Image (cartoon, rainbow, N blue to C red):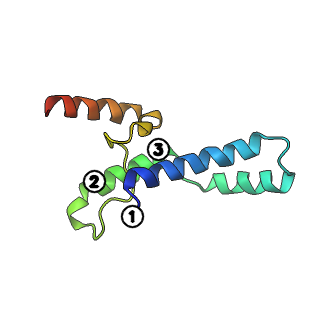
Amino acid sequence: MTMPSERTLAVLKTREFLQNLIKNTETPEYIRHEAKWLLRHYPDATDIKIVAQAMQTMRSSLPAGPVFCIDDPFCPTLSKYFPQEALANVSKVQENP
C-alpha cells in the first residue's frame, strides 16, 4: 500500500525528472517538447499543499484517507519541498513526546 508521503514524493520527484529532461540538451527534442507540455499541466508543490490541506479538513469524510501528505515526521525528505510544514511538525513532536 502506498502511503500519502510516498505518493507525494513520487509526484514531486516526477516533476523534477521532467524538468531535468527539458534542461538536458542530449535528450531528443521530441521528448523535451513532450516533457515541457506535460509540466504545463503537472501539479507543483503548491498544488499538492492545497490538496493535502483540503483533504486534512475533510479527513473524516474521505473513504480511503488522504492522498497527499506534506508533514509526515517519518518522511524527512518532504521538508525539502515543504520546509514550513516540517518545522511545524518538529514542534508538534517536541511538544508531545
Residue labelled with disc 1: 1
Residue labelled with disc 2: 56
Q: Do the numbered discs 1 and 3 sit on residues whose CB atoms are within 8 Å?
A: no
Residue labelled with disc 3: 46
Which of the two labelled residues, at mark 1 and mark 2, occupies the earlier sequence position? 1
Residue 1 on image: x %, y %: 39, 64
Find the distance from the CA under tag 1 to the CA under tag 2.
Answer: 19 Å
The quadrant in which residue 74 appears is top left
Three-letter amino acid code at the position of disc 3: Thr
Residue 88 as seen in the image, left or right of residue 51: left
Q: Which mark is residue 68?
A: none
Q: Residues within 10 Å of mark 2 (few under 14, many from 20)?
A: some
Residue 57 on image: x %, y %: 25, 54
Which of the two labelled residues, at mark 3 and mark 2, occupies the earlier sequence position? 3
Q: What element carries label 1?
A: loop
* Residue at 45% from the left image edge and 51% from the top image edge: 8
Q: Which residue lies furthest to the left in this view?
A: 96
* Residue at 52% from the left image edge and 52% from the top image edge: 10
Q: How crowded is mark 1: few (under 14 residues within 10 Å), some or many (20 or more)?
A: few
Residue 69's place in the image compared with 85, above or below, is below
Find the distance from the CA under tag 3 to the CA under tag 2.
Answer: 15 Å
Residue 60's place in the image compared with 75, above or below, is below
Front of the two marks 1 and 2: 1
Q: How many marks?
A: 3
Q: What element carries label 3?
A: helix
Three-letter amino acid code at the position of disc 2: Gln
Residue 68 as seen in the image, left or right of residue 88: right
* Residue at 41% from the left image edge and 34% from the top image edge: 79
Find the distance from the CA under tag 1 to the CA under tag 3.
Answer: 25 Å
Three-letter amino acid code at the position of disc 1: Met
Which of the two labelled residues, at mark 1 and mark 3, occupies the earlier sequence position? 1
The quadrant in which residue 59 appears is bottom left
